[in-house]
Image (cartoon, grey):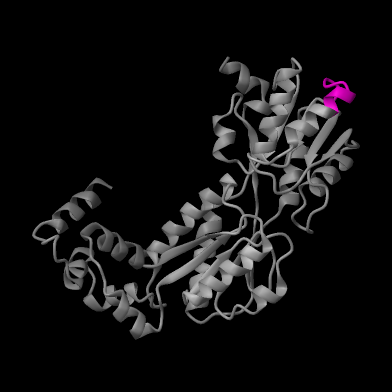
Amino acid sequence: MIEEKRARRNAMKGFDMTMVTMEEVAKAAHVSRATVSRVLSNHPSITMETRSNVMYWVRKLGYEPNQVAQSLAGNRTNLIGVLFSDLSNPLYASLMTSIVHGAEIYGYNVILGDAQREKAREASIINGFKRRKVDGIIVRPIGTPNKKLYSGIGIPMVSLFKRTEKKNIIISSEEGGIQVARHFCELGHRNIGYIGPIRSLAGNNKLEGFRSELEKNGLKLKAVLECNQHETVENQRVYEIISQYFKDHDPEKITAWFAHSDIAASDVIKALTEYGLEVPNDVIVCGYNNTLLARKMIPTLSSVASPIEEIAKSAVDMLFNGINGNMEEELIQLSPRLVIRESTSRELYNQHK
C-alpha cells in the first residue's frame, strides 16, 4: 500500500493541474489514451480494476472530459436517475451514498429523486428522468410496484427490494425475521411481542418469518401491535401505540420485543424506560435496518442489517450491464444479517455500564 501511494505521488510530478489532458491521465494510470477514452465512454470491454484505476486518476488530476462530445459519440448522457420511496429513511440515505460512489467509477453522475411515499410523485419523477434522457434508472418502488409505469420505461432499470419485470435486487425480510426469532429463542425468551406492519408482500414480510420461526420452536406471539410500514421520525405512532398497550397490559409480561424498524425500536425502548424497565436487563428489544441510530442509541440497538455495499455494487453493475445492451430480466437475492448489540445482550450492556 505504501509503495502504491509512493508510485502515485511520483506519477503526479510534472503535471500542470490547470490543463490536464487525456494523455496525462493515461500516463499517470499507466494505460493507453484509448483505454482512458473507453473508460470515460463506459465501454463494456473495460475491466472493473482498470476502470477504478483510471477514474482514480481522472479525479486526482482534475481532468474534465468533454461530456458533450462523449454524449454525441456514444448517444449517452452519462447520467442515471436514482429514485427512493422516502429519503427520510436512514437506510436509503446510506444506500444512496454507496450508489453515487459506484456510479462515479463508471464515470457517471446521478440525478436523485425522492418520492416521499407519494405514487403521483413517483410517476412524475420517473417521467422527469426520461425527459432528462438518463441512460438508466435505479428505483426503490412504493408499495406494490406500478406495473404500467415500470414496464413502459423503455430504458435499463434496476428495482431494489421489490420485484418488477426488469432487473431486481431482493433482500428477504422474512429471513431477517427468522434470524431475530432464533436469537430470542436462544436467549430463552418465551413471552415475545412484535410491533410493525402485519400485511406485506411475499418475501418482504418480517412478521411472517418471525412468527413461523417461533412456531417451529413451540412458541406463539403474546402480542402483535400493528403500525404503518412507512412511518418516519416525524409521523410515526409507535410510541403512542406501545404506551397505550402498556396502559392496558403489564409491561413486564413481554420480555422480548421485535420492532419493524430502528426508529420504531427506539420508541419502544423510550416507553419501556418510562415504565421503569431497563433494556436489556428487564426486557430486550431488536430493530431492523441497522441504521446509524442503532449504533448511537443507549443502549446500542441490535438490528437486522441489509448488505448496503453489496446492494449498491450489484445495482450499479446490473444497471450498466443493461446500458451496454443486456436488457433481460435479472434477479439477485441477498441475505440480511442480525447484528447483536447491547439491547439484546446483557453481557455487552453491563460491560459498558
- Nearer to the camera, 287 or 45: 287
In the rendered image, which quarter contains the C terminus? top right
Identify the residue at horizontal 71%, vertical 69% (top origin).
146
Tell me if residue 92 comes above or below residue 265 in the rendering: below
Residue 250 colored in magenta in the image: yes
* Residue 281 appears anywhere in the view: no
* Residue 53 appears anywhere in the view: yes
Tell me if residue 204 comes above or below residue 149 in the rendering: above
On the rendered structure, is 131 left or right of 51? right
On the rendered structure, is 108 left or right of 327? left
Identify the residue at horizontal 19%, vertical 50% (top origin).
6
Residue 164 colored in magenta in the image: no
- Nearer to the camera, 333 or 259: 259
Residue 199, given in percent of the width and then of the height, sits at 82, 52
Identify the residue at horizontal 66%, vertical 31% (top origin).
266
Residue 96, given in percent of the width and then of the height, sits at 50, 54
On the rendered structure, is 119 left or right of 100? right
Magenta range: 245-253
Q: In which quarter of the image is residue 188?
A: top right
Residue 126, given in percent of the width and then of the height, sits at 57, 70
Tell me if residue 214 comes above or below residue 244 in the rendering: below
Q: In which quarter of the image is residue 31?
A: bottom left
Residue 271, given in percent of the width and then of the height, sits at 73, 24
Query: Which residue is at the far left?
Result: 14
Q: In which quarter of the image is residue 167?
A: bottom right
Tell me if residue 315 comes above or below residue 304 in the rendering: below
Identify the residue at horizontal 89%, vertical 33% (top origin).
222
